Image (cartoon, rainbow, N blue to C red):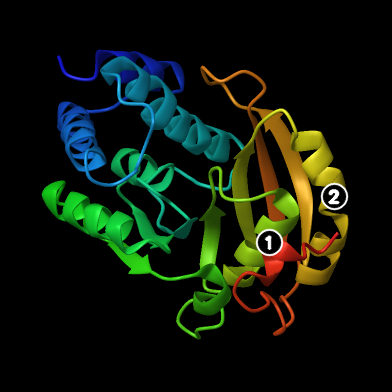
Amino acid sequence: MPMEVLARAAEGLGLPLSAQQLQQFEEYYHELIAANRHVNLTSITDYQEVQRRHFGESLAVGAALYRAGVLKPGETARVLDLGAGAGFPGLPMRIAHPALRLTILEATRKKTAFLERLVTRLSLEGVTVITGRAEIVAHEPAHREGYDLALARAVAPLAVLVELALPFLKVGGCLATPKGSRASQEMAEADRALALCGGRIVSAEPLPSPTPTLTLVLVEKLAPTPAAYPRRPGAPTKRPLH
């Protein structure tokens, strides 16, 4: 059976995968490795490690969102994966939860070209890939405050990420971001960004994964984000709202 490591991990998370879904993950792996020869998508290429780290950790995020009530099995949600790179965690979550309407935002055209091919190859409906910067796309009416959930994995420190992601969310929506050993420090440094952009941290729970000290931080959108945010491209990173 393909993807045995992932299949066991998914069972343990309460997200059993069908044979068709496991085959989609198998194809995802082979497409990733082939594209990685030409585009810098991942430093992890071992078959089992990709299952554990990329696919398994992505599904662990999804399972945590089910437990928190942010996602409900079978229910539609409009989801943005911000700075998705090779598609993590959004695409694995979409494979496991076909009702998700997923938009993938990535600034690097070579990466979005890979993602477009992958979405077509896996026959994933309801998935849109956009090449662009969050600082620009977040001001477009089609995306401004239109999403139920924003995902971000290894994109930026939390203070920066809050400014980039919260403008995309509806009031009542959530940002979900896995953080490493600096999670507590990043949360403390994000107070001003949260206050300015209309959010608050509602939970920070350990995420079951092969990576030690991985914490899933959930930020709820409490109020509309002022039109000034996010600032022009590069400003959130160069001058975080500390």
Residue 107 as seen in the image, left or right of residue 222: left
The extreme front residue here reads: 38
* Three-letter amino acid code of the residue under disc 2: Glu
Label ID, residue 139: none
Mark 2 near mark 1, Cβ–Cβ under 8 Å?
Answer: no
Which residue does the image show at 57% across and 48% down from the upper left? 70
- Distance from the alpha carbon under mark 2 to that under mark 1: 13 Å
* Three-letter amino acid code of the residue under disc 1: Thr
Residue 146 as seen in the image, left or right of residue 110: right
Which tag is nearer the camera, tag 2 or tag 1?
1
Q: Quadrant of the N terminus?
A: top left
Relative to the observer, which residue lies in front, 97 or 152? 152
Mark 2 = which residue?
189
Residue 148 location, x and y as percent? 54, 62
Relative to the observer, which residue lies in front, 70 or 83? 83
User: Hey, which quadrant is residue 97 in on the image?
Assistant: top left
Residue 112 as seen in the image, left or right of residue 172: left
